[in-house]
């Protein structure tokens, strides 16, 4: 019997399914980004910006870095939303039920 076409799970463990299902790769990257701290997200974004501004990366690498940056921005926004919700809960629990107001920086505060 020819064992080249074995259906054993052992052979399947070496297959990178991300190349067949790119959306799985994106979801895994997104989950990884959500586990990062807000400061780590900012550091990673800064690294990506420097890499892209340097201009020494290929178009494919630049697009991949840009995509990673978009996911990091979304993860950072999610962290900020969570922090805002937590602050709102703490204010509500302390009896100060005022809603948080939006911050609009004046020129020079940006």
Image (spheres, helix red, strand yellow):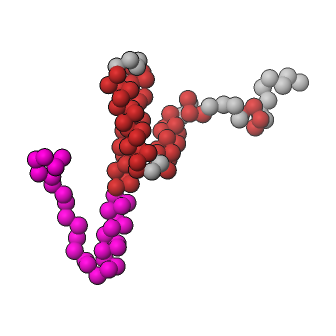
Which residue is painted at 89% across and 24% down in the image? 1
- Give the vertical position of 91 relative to 66 (above or below): below
> Magenta span covers which residues?
81-110
At 31% across and 77% down in the image, what residue appears? Answer: 92
Identified at 33% across, 67% down, the residue is 87
Residue 40 left/right relative to 18: left
Residue furthest toward the left? 107
| Residue 107 position within the rendered picture, expressed as x and y whole percent measured from the top left | 10, 47
Outermost residue on the front side: it is 108
Residue 43 covered by magenta stretch: no
Task: Please count the marks in the image.
Answer: 0
Q: Is residue 107 magenta?
A: yes
Quadrant hosting residue 43: top left
List the single residue furthest toward the bottom: 95
Which residue sits furthest right? 1
Asked which quadrant contains residue 101, the reply is: bottom left
The picture quadrant where one finds residue 2 is: top right
Towards the viewer: 6 or 27: 27
Q: Position of residue 25 (x, y in %)?
A: 52, 37
Near-viewer residue (102 or 105): 105
Picture coordinates of residue 35, whole percent (x, y): 49, 50
Residue 83 versus residue 36 in the image, above or below: below
Q: Residue 5's spot in the image, x, y percent?
A: 78, 26
Which is more toward the observer, 9 or 79? Answer: 79
Q: Which residue is found at the position 45% from the left and 51% from the top?
A: 37
Q: Is residue 93 visible?
A: yes
Q: Tell me if residue 27 can be seen.
A: no
């Amino acid at each position: 019997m020819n064992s080249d076409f074995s259906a054993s799970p052992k052979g399947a463990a070496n297959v990178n399914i991300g190349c067949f299902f790119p959306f799985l790769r994106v979801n895994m990257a997104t989950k990884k980004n959500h586990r990062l701290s807000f400061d780590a997200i900012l550091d990673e974004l800064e690294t990506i910006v420097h890499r892209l501004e340097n201009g020494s990366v290929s178009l494919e690498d630049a697009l991949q870095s840009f995509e990673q940056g978009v996911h990091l921005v979304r993860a950072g926004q999610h962290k900020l939303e969570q922090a805002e919700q937590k602050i709102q809960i703490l204010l509500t629990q302390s009896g100060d039920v005022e809603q948080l107001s939006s911050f609009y920086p004046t020129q020079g505060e940006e």
